[in-house]
Amino acid sequence: DLYDADPHLVDVVLPGVDLDVFHDRDRAAARSALGYRPEDLVVLFVGRIQPLKAPDLLVRAMALLAARDPQLAGRVRREFCGGPSGSGREHPSALSDLAADLGVAAQFHAPTDRTRLRQRYAAADVVVVPSHSESFGLVAVEAQACGTPVLAANVGGLPVAVADGVSGTLVDGHEPGTWANA
């Protein structure tokens, strides 16, 4: 409509994922291979470590959760898979520094190949995508293809990628308390 394009000449391509790589797998085996205990609750962030992707929001929300319910927080493993990019390169240790300042234990993993990433998705209890802007939501789609629910910001392409209440939960806003509740 904005460009007066002929609708017959427009194709809409919805988010997709390579199902030969990202698919359900043995969750227990994935967790065991990564050294998780059966009682661990694994919260996984995958993506570029930069302000736009809002990984700090996850750390802040987990700090609030720890204050509210230390016993639950003691079971949570906060895992981050990705490296600094864009404006995140200005202070590459900012996220780990924040986690340390807030007393939130977290594991940081470098970007990895798709097979190992599939294993991380399969082992997680939830994948968190708190981005301020997300055009496509590839991480959300990959995680869901591996059978893992997604907690995602209700922005950009994420409402298309995540079926709220079905394959995950969409969260309005970027307030840490709201995310801790979710």
Image: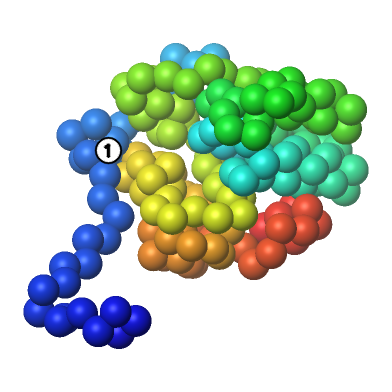
Quarter of the image that includes the N terminus:
bottom left
In this view, which residue lies farthest toward the left?
8
Q: Secondary structure at mark 1?
A: loop
Q: How many marks?
A: 1
Residue positioned 32% across, 45% down in the render: 145
Q: Which residue does the numbered mark 1 point to in the structure image?
A: 23
Q: Position of residue 170 (x, y in %)?
A: 55, 63
Q: Is residue 143 above or below residue 167?
A: above
Residue positioned 40% across, 26% down in the render: 117
Q: Residues within 10 Å of mark 1 (few under 14, many from 20)?
A: some
Q: Is residue 38 left or right of residue 7?
A: right
Q: Position of residue 11 (x, y in %)?
A: 16, 68
Q: Nearer the viewer, residue 80 or 131?
A: 131
Q: Is residue 106 left or right of residue 158?
A: right
Q: Is residue 130 left or right of residue 101?
A: left
Residue positioned 89% across, 28% down in the render: 101
Q: Is residue 125 above or below residue 96?
A: below
